[in-house]
Amino acid sequence: MANAASDGATAALLRPLCEGANIRTWVGFKHFMYLGEQAVLDWFRDREAGPSALFHRYGLGLSVISSSAQLPAVLDLDDVTDAAVTGGPERFEVKLTAHRHGTPTVLRARVGVALVKEADAPASAPPPWLAPLVIADVGDAGATARPDREAPPGAGNGATGYAWSWRVPYYFCQYSNRMQHSGYVRVLEEAVDRFLADKGLGIADVLRDRGWIPVVSRARVSLLADAVMGETMHTTMSVTDVLKRTCFAARMDCYVPRGRAMVHTASADILHAYAIARGESAGQTAELDDGFIAALTRGRPS
């Protein structure tokens, strides 16, 4: 349950879903980002402007259009967190603190939202404090420059690249129509998994052979244009940097074909490392050896 403070902040108690604990009982990065989004939605609910109310009263879709998250500590499946939300109504700061020894901060995030006019919903004028958030579609938010393409993207952005195409499913969408923020977060996780497998560094193989588990310390997702249920999505993933032989930065871009153009619908960045899962060094960050780095940056080893 959330409550609104007198200074405009909102506080809530949130717990991660069991789905997020894929390695031991540690929760993966996308569920950190889900909790950040949930905290912001609760901020609106506390002001009688939750997603359902906005849709049915004003024909508006409350949509997260940008997020940037730092994950300074692990989140366990049984953790309860205090979620502190400040800012609004367009941009928010979210802080999650775990209820355990030391009360560590497990998430610091910035979240941007917009109210998108929905075609098949009743429409009336929203309250004045919400009016500046209203846009016709996600592309009108103008959060980031959008470099569209003339041809489908491929793995041609260097030997480090990986690309695949897929259909936008209904369960990635919101309001019966548009790809939503959490859908792109899920795609970002899949993009990393596919990229690593393509480079001979599949997560299951690395866990079995090296005893390393993947960890994420930073992630960002930005929606640039609408992607609609049933459209074909072209997605690319590539490594942009290897830092201090302990982590690698990667970028994801998503495009949908419209006429002669490939419309850039979203971009994302992620900072990925590995923790040692067994032995005397368990819990420490693994050092990436030359072969591992070569696979990340020059393709599958011969």
Image (cartoon, rainbow, N blue to C red):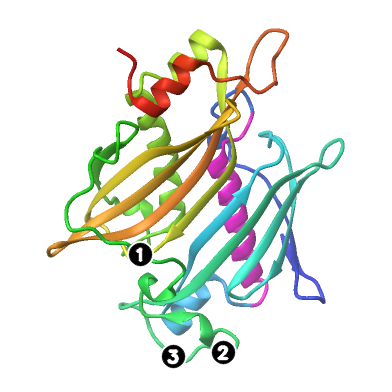
Q: Quadrant of the C terminus?
A: top left
| Residue 171 vertical placement versus 205 (above, below) | below
Image: magenta residue range: 26-47
Q: Residue at x 80, y 41 (%)?
A: 104
Residue 85 visible within the image: yes
Residue 202 visible within the image: no
Q: CA distance from mark 2 to mark 1?
A: 31 Å
Tag 1: residue type? Answer: Arg
Question: Mark 2 or 1 closer to N-term?
Answer: 2
x and y, in percent, of residue 260 in the image? 12, 63
Q: CA distance from mark 3 to mark 2?
A: 10 Å
Q: CA distance from mark 1 to mark 3?
A: 31 Å
Q: Residue at x 60, y 87 (%)?
A: 129
Q: Quadrant of residue 216?
A: top right
x and y, in percent, of residue 3 in the image? 76, 67
Secondary structure found at label 1: loop
Asked if residue 105 lies left or right of residue 147, the reply is: right
In the rendered image, the residue lying farthest to the right is 102
Q: Are marks 2 and 1 in contact (CB under 8 Å)?
A: no
Q: Residue at x 67, y 45 (%)?
A: 15
Circle on res. 124:
3
| Residue 247 vertical placement versus 42 (above, below) | above
Q: Quadrant of the N terminus?
A: bottom right
Label 2 sits on residue: 127
Q: Quadrant of residue 227?
A: bottom left
Secondary structure found at label 3: loop
- Magenta portion: prevailing SS class: helix
Residue 28 located within the stretch drawn in magenta: yes
Q: Quadrant of residue 38?
A: bottom right
Residue 147 located within the stretch drawn in magenta: no
Label 1 sits on residue: 146
